[in-house]
Image (cartoon, rainbow, N blue to C red):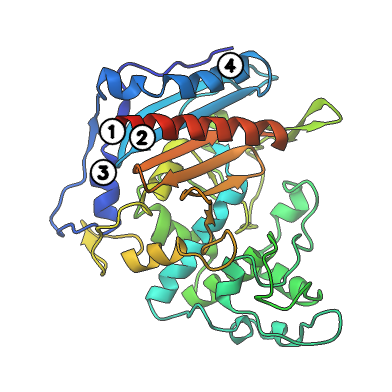
Amino acid sequence: MQASLSPRWLRSVVFGLAIGIAAGFGASESAEIEAAEVEPTEGEAARYDGAYRLLEQAVAEGKVPGVAALVMRRGKLVREAAYGVCDVENKRPFRTDTVCWLASITKPMTVAAAMRLVEDGKLSLDDPIEKYLPEFKNQTTSDGRHYPITIRQLMSHTSGIGQRPPLRPSLFFETEWLGRRLAEVPPAIAAMPLEFKPGERVQYSNAAPYVLGRIVEIAAGRPLDQYMREKTFEPLFMSDTFFAIPPSHAERMAVVYRMVDGRRETFFRFDPKWKMTMTMPDGGVFSTPRDVAKFVNAFLDENSVPGRVTINGRESFLTSDSRRQMRTVQAAGWGLGWELKADGLFSHDGSSGTSAWADPATGTVGVVFCQIQDKKVTDALQAEFREAVRTAARGERE
């Protein structure tokens, strides 16, 4: 079942240089950003043997059709591998550069876009959303009371907005839905009653990001996907990250499966004929493990300069203050966009079987893509891999 073993010679971008400079980590404007071959030492990559054997075994036992995983430490790629297949029917092997549907890992990316506008003075975290979307002035709880929702509450799952976005079908990739516009969704959300007073408690919401995404569009003066490409994906050199997948990437796309009554069914298979105009800010991004690792790693370095720099005509990512705010507790278990775990990690998972996290204590980033909706299996596998990686990284540090 093994499709790709971790190679002895690992190809990598020098993430510490590229990400550090792009994020504004004390770089000068004349600094060069280069791609290079990086050869981890034998011992460096081998420390993670146990973690990767867990994934290889899961594929061999048929728990998941395939998986790709990456480990980065202190900005350097130390190991990546892929096992099994990303397309069962066509027997396409899962590769380390296979493009996958991230699902909810999109959420902290959307929050990062909004934080850029906060930095630029075009939004404030405590602005009421009705300042930008007047239809929310009429939204009430079921008992008829109106409570203003803030942008901060949209980011921290404390808004009171329901879990499910209205208008979206149960199968996200239906043609009618893909042809809609983001602007159509917030008015339908505003017409629904709030489920509780904003700030009163935490309730995970897939609908709230549609409100946040639309506010980003209004404040930025351009579509969300365009703004995120300019302010997040390009500054972090995420060249394989998209909302609308280029048809040229069709052969690199992973199929997403789901388990229904013990049977595996196809949930998502990319069709290059799709006309995708709907930008799903709660879960519409497609990417690779390397690109996602670049995004997560940008939140680890605490030595960034407070301002923003321009490198070879390319603006850097968020300032250190914004990144720290996103990692600061706002409500139980949540920062702004990031889930904050009791063991000090910050992370986000996706319903498609994706997971990404960072461990500030060891400077480690991990990414695992399974591409199957089988939460019991994928949650356990990802947790085991995460713990094995952390144990290995701590051993390396010592």
Q: Nearer the viewer, residue 318 or 183?
A: 318
Q: Nearer the viewer, residue 389 or 31?
A: 389
Label 1 packing within 10 angstroms: few (<14), some (14-19), many (20+): few
User: What amino acid is labelled 4 in the image?
Assistant: Gln
Callouts 1 and 4 close, C-beta under 8 Å: no
Q: Nearer the viewer, residue 166 or 148?
A: 148
Mark 1 and mark 4: span between their CA atoms?
Answer: 28 Å
Mark 3 and mark 1: span between their CA atoms?
Answer: 21 Å
User: What amino acid is labelled 2 in the image?
Assistant: Arg
Q: Which residue is mark 4?
A: 57
Label 4 packing within 10 angstroms: few (<14), some (14-19), many (20+): some
Q: Which residue is mark 1?
A: 398
Q: Position of residue 220 (x, y in %)?
A: 47, 73
- Regarding mark 2 in the picture, which secondary structure is present there? helix
Label 2 packing within 10 angstroms: few (<14), some (14-19), many (20+): some
Q: Nearer the viewer, mark 4 or mark 3?
A: 4
Q: Nearer the viewer, mark 1 or mark 4?
A: 1
Left or right of 378 on screen, residue 74: left
Callouts 2 and 4 close, C-beta under 8 Å: no
**Does residue 98 show up?**
no
**Does residue 281 show up?**
yes
Callouts 2 and 1 close, C-beta under 8 Å: yes
- Regarding mark 1 in the picture, which secondary structure is present there? loop
Q: Position of residue 49 (x, y in %)?
A: 42, 19
Q: Which residue is mark 3?
A: 16
Left or right of 104 on screen, residue 173: right
Taking 316 as reference, is 220 above or below it?
A: below
What residue lies at 40% left-to-right and 81% top-to-bottom?
A: 121
Q: Nearer the viewer, mark 3 or mark 1?
A: 1
User: What amino acid is labelled 3 in the image?
Assistant: Gly
Q: Which residue is mark 2?
A: 394
